[in-house]
C-alpha cells in the first residue's frame, strides 16, 4: 500500500501484515523545496512504483522515482498559482496513463489538465472555465479523475455531487450518476469496471455497478424519423410518467428544464428536448431524467455560433446531426454531436421579409433530402430553403399578408410535409390547420 500522509507531508509504503511503514517520498516537513512536499491530496503509483504527488499548496505535481526518497522532479505546474496553461491552482487528484501523460484535477480552476511527458504546459481536457458551475461543460471543485481503456475521463465533481464522463476531445461531459452523493472525494474503478466512490460526508463507500448491454455489429444506420405505426384502436393511459424535468419550477441543472418547447427522438432511443428558457438542447438516455447539453453550451442567450437565442424547433437525423431553429437569431443551425459550435445553414443575416432572410419563426420541417421548410410566424408565410443554398428561400405557402382567406396565413407555427410535398400548417392566428398541396 502507498499512503499519502498529508499532515506529515510524506508518502508511506506498507506491506500487508506489517506494523510499520517506510517513507518513499517527502518526510522533510512542509515546504516548496524539491526535497519536500506541501499539503497534498492526490497520488498515483505507476507500474514501476514511481510516485506522482499532486501538491495542493505548491500548485505542482512532482515525480518521486522508485528508490529515490531524496528529491522529487517537477512534472506539472510549479510556476505559481494561476489559470494559464503552465500553471495550476490547488491541484487535487492525479492520474498517469501508459504514455506517461499526466491528468491533473486542477481544482481551483475547476478543470482537468493534461500534461504530456516533458512538456512545459497543460492542455485543458475537461472543464472550460475558471468559474465553478453545474452545466455539462463545467465543474465545481472537482477532486478525482480516472480513465477507462477507451480514453474516457471519469471526474468526481465534488460540489455538484456527481460523476461526469468526458469522451476524448469532447467539449462537455455526461453525468454518470448524481443526486445520491454528498461531497465525495475519492474515485476508482475496481477490476470488474464498477465505479467505487468515497462518499465523504455520508461516511460511506459506494459502488456503481457496470452494465454492458449486448451489442450487435452492423453497418446499417438507425432508421430516420417516421410516423409511428399505431393500431386503429390505440388508447393512452390517463396518468403519466415524468421523463424529463424534476419539479414544477424552472432550472438550469442537468435534471431541470426551463420552458421546454418541443422534443424529438433519434434512432438510438435518445430523447432531445428544446430547453427554450435555457437556450440549449438537452439529450436524455432512455430511462434517465439526467440530461446532457449537446447544443447551446452558453447558459445565456447569444448570437455566437456556440449560442442560441430562444431555440424553438429541432430535427435530428439518422447520424444524430441536429438542425435547430434559432428563433431570435433568425437562423437555422446545424450541430454535430460533440461539437462546441454549430454551422449556420439558413439565413444568419438578421430579421426581414425579403427572401434572403427569415422573420420570427417557431416551426420547421426537414425532408429526406435535407431541404428545410420554415414556418415564418412574423412574415405569415412558409419558405423552402434547398439543401446547400443559404442565399434565398422559395415561397411555398402564404406570403400574401396576414389574413384568414385561403391564400393567407396568420402567425403560422408548426408544420409537417408529407411524401407528396404537401404541407400541413398550424395557422395559429386563425385557429386552424391548413393543407397546401405542392405547387399551389
Image: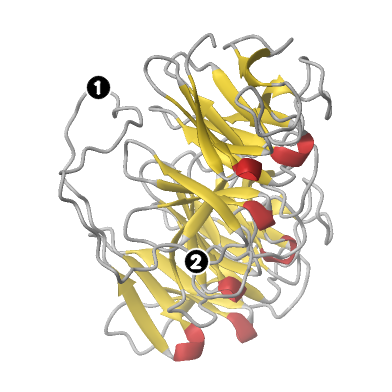
Q: Is residue 351 visible?
A: yes
Residue, disc 2: 245
Residue, disc 1: 220
Asked if the residue at tag 2 contacts the one at tag 1, i.e. Cβ–Cβ closer than 8 Å, the answer is no
Position of 90 relative to 224 (above/below): below
Q: Residue furthest front?
A: 405
Position of 376 relative to 20 (above/below): above
Of residues 229 and 136, the one nearer the viewer is 229
Of residues 420 and 127, the one nearer the viewer is 420
Residue 187: % across, % down: 44, 68
Residue 39: % across, % down: 68, 77
Residue density around tag 2, few if under 14, some if 14–19, many if 20 or more, within 10 Å? many
Which quadrant is the C terminus positioned in?
top right
Secondary structure state at the residue bearing disc 2: loop
**At 62% from the left edge and 15% from the top edge, which residue is drawn?**
385
Q: Alpha carbon of mark 1 to alpha carbon of mark 2: how far?
A: 33 Å
Q: Is residue 336 visible?
A: no
Left or right, 399 with respect to 8, comes to right
Left or right, 284 with respect to 127, comes to left
Secondary structure state at the residue bearing disc 1: loop
Quarter of the figure with residue 53: bottom right
Amino acid at each position: 500500500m502507498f499512503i499519502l500522509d498529508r499532515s506529515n507531508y510524506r508518502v508511506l509504503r506498507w506491506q500487508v501484515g506489517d506494523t510499520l511503514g517506510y517513507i518513499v517520498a517527502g518526510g522533510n516537513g512542509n515546504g516548496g523545496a524539491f526535497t519536500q512536499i506541501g499539503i497534498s491530496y492526490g497520488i498515483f503509483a505507476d507500474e514501476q512504483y514511481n510516485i506522482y504527488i499532486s501538491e495542493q499548496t505548491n500548485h505542482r505535481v512532482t515525480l518521486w522515482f522508485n528508490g529515490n526518497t531524496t528529491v522529487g522532479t517537477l512534472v506539472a505546474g510549479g510556476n505559481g498559482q494561476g489559470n494559464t496553461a503552465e500553471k495550476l491552482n490547488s491541484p487535487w487528484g492525479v492520474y498517469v496513463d501508459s504514455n506517461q501523460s499526466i491528468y491533473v484535477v486542477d481544482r481551483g480552476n475547476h478543470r482537468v489538465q493534461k500534461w504530456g511527458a516533458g512538456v512545459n504546459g497543460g492542455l485543458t481536457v475537461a472543464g472550460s472555465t475558471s468559474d465553478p458551475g453545474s452545466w455539462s461543460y463545467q465543474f465545481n471543485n472537482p477532486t478525482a479523475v480516472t480513465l477507462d481503456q477507451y480514453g474516457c475521463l471519469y471526474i468526481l465533481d465534488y460540489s455538484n455531487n456527481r460523476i461526469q464522463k468526458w469522451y476524448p476531445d469532447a467539449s462537455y461531459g455526461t453525468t454518470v450518476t448524481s443526486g445520491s452523493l454528498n461531497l465525495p472525494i475519492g474515485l476508482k474503478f475496481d477490476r470488474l469496471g464498477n465505479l467505487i466512490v468515497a462518499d465523504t460526508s455520508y461516511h460511506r463507500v459506494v459502488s456503481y455497478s457496470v452494465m454492458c448491454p449486448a451489442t450487435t455489429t452492423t453497418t446499417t444506420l438507425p432508421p430516420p424519423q417516421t410516423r409511428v405505426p399505431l393500431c386503429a384502436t390505440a388508447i393512452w393511459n390517463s396518468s403519466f410518467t415524468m421523463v424529463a424535468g424534476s419539479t414544477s419550477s424552472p432550472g438550469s441543472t442537468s435534471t431541470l428544464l426551463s420552458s421546454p418547447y418541443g422534443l424529438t427522438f433519434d434512432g438510438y432511443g435518445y430523447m432531445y428536448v428544446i430547453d427554450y428558457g435555457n437556450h440549449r438542447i438537452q439529450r436524455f438516455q432512455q430511462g434517465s431524467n439526467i440530461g446532457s447539453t449537446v447544443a447551446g453550451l452558453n447558459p445565456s442567450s447569444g448570437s455566437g455560433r456556440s449560442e442560441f437565442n430562444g431555440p424553438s424547433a429541432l430535427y435530428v437525423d439518422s447520424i444524430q446531426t441536429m438542425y435547430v431553429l434559432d428563433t431570435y437569431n433568425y437562423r437555422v443551425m446545424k450541430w454535430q454531436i460533440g461539437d462546441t459550435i454549430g454551422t449556420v445553414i439558413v439565413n444568419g443575416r438578421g430579421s426581414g421579409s425579403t427572401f434572403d432572410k427569415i422573420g420570427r419563426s417557431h416551426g420547421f420541417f426537414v425532408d429526406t433530402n435535407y431541404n428545410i421548410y420554415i414556418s415564418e410566424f412574423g412574415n405569415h408565410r412558409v419558405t423552402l430553403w434547398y439543401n446547400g443554398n443559404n442565399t434565398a428561400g422559395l415561397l411555398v405557402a402564404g406570403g400574401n399578408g396576414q389574413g384568414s382567406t385561403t391564400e393567407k396565413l396568420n402567425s403560422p407555427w408548426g408544420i409537417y410535409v408529407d411524401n407528396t410535398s404537401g404541407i400541413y400548417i398550424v395557422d395559429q392566428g386563425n385557429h386552424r390547420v391548413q393543407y397546401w398541396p405542392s405547387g399551389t
